[in-house]
Image (cartoon, rainbow, N blue to C red):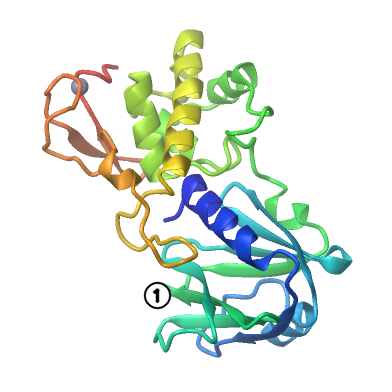
Amino acid sequence: MPELPEVETIRRDLLAVVLGRTVRDAWISPNAPRLVQLMTPEAFCRGLGGRRIEDVGRRGKYLLIHLEGGLTWIVHLRMTGRLQHTLGGCPDDAHLRAKFELDDGRWLCFIDMRKFGTMWLVDDVELVTGKLGPEPLEETFDVAAFHGSLRRRSAAIKAVLLDQAVLAGVGNIYADESLFRAGIDPRKAAKRISGPAARRLHEAIVEVLLEAVGDRGSSFQDYVDAQGEAGYHQLKVRVFRRTDEPCLVCGTTIRRVKVGGRSTHFCPKCQRR
Ligand SMILES: [Zn+2]
C-alpha cells in the first residue's frame, strides 16, 4: 500500500503538470461502485467538471487536489490504486476505474486492481482527514506529544505506529524500518517505550520517511509514481521483506512475525526487547 513517501511523490509529480489546469470531463466506471464516497458518481463528476486545479496537497496517505470554489478532490489509493497522468487519453486497462480529461490534452487515469481506492469531493477536508494524527515531516510532530500518545497505548508499538490517529502516513514498510533504526522490538508494548527510545524512534521515523521521499518511494508490488515509474527505496530497506537474510548491521537472521495481524520484520539482536 502506498504510504507517505509514495503519496508525496505522486503529489509532487501531479503538481508539476496539473496546476492551473481545468478538469474538462470526468468518468467513473460502473464497475467501481465504492470509489466515490458521500455522493453519487454522477454528482461527483458534475462537481469536478469545469473546475480549475489550484493546488495539490497531501495529508497522511490522502492526496488533496484543491479546486477553485473551495472544493477539494480527495484521493486515497488504498492497496493497489494508481493515479497517473497521460497525454491524449487513458490506457486500455481492465482495471481503469476513473478518468479525468484536463484542458491541455492531458488525462488523469485511476487504475485500481483491488478496487479499495476511494475519492471524495468536499468543501471541508476535515470531514475526511479530521481524525488523523500529526504529519511526521512537519513541525507539529512533537517528540513529547508523540511519547505521550505511545504511553496511553498498551498495544505493540508496531501496531500503534500504524494507527493513523497516532501518526499520519506511516504504514507497514516504514514502521518496520523506523523500529529497526531505533533499535526497538516491534512487539514491545507502546506504553513501555522509554523517553530516550521515543526520541530515537521519532528521529528514525523522520529520517526513514525523508530518505524514502528522496528515493521516490518503495515499489515492492503495485506502487508506481504519477508517470507509471517505480521508486527506488525498496533497494535500500534494512529489514522489510528481508526475512531469513542477514541483518546488515550484525549479521543475525532477520525474522518475520505477525504483530496486530500484520507481517513484521525485525532483527532479534539489534531490536532486543
Ligand atoms: Zn542486527
The residue at label 1 has a CB less than 8 Å from ligand 1:
no
Q: Residues within 10 Å of mark 1 (few under 14, many from 20)?
A: some
Residue drawn at 44 percent across, 45 percent down: 171
Q: Quadrant of residue 42?
A: bottom right
Image quarter where ligand 1 lies: top left
Residue 244 x, y percent position in the rendering: 11, 38
Q: Of residues 107 and 242, which is closer to you in this image? A: 107
Residue drawn at 50 percent across, 29 percent down: 206
Q: Is residue 156 visible?
A: no
Tell me if 195 is positioned left or right of 57 in this view. left
Tell me if 37 is positioned left or right of 1 in this view. right
Where 243 sits versus 53, above or below? above
Q: Of residues 108 and 33, which is closer to you in this image? A: 108
Q: Mark 1 — residue?
A: 113
Residue 51 x, y percent position in the rendering: 80, 75
Residue 156 x, y percent position in the rendering: 40, 30
Tell me if 66 is positioned left or right of 239 in this view. right
Residue 253 x, y percent position in the rendering: 12, 29
Residue drawn at 47 percent across, 43 percent down: 213
Q: Of residues 255 and 178, which is closer to you in this image? A: 178
Tell me if 119 is positioned left or right of 201 in this view. right
Q: Secondary structure at mark 1?
A: loop
Residue drawn at 63 percent across, 28 percent down: 141
Where 188 sits versus 123, above or below? above
Going by the picture, which residue comes out furthest to the right? 69
Q: Of residues 117 and 149, which is closer to you in this image? A: 117
Where 195 sits versus 222, above or below? above
Q: Where, quadrant-wise, is the N terminus in this rendering? A: bottom left
Q: Look at label 1 and name its amino acid.
A: Met
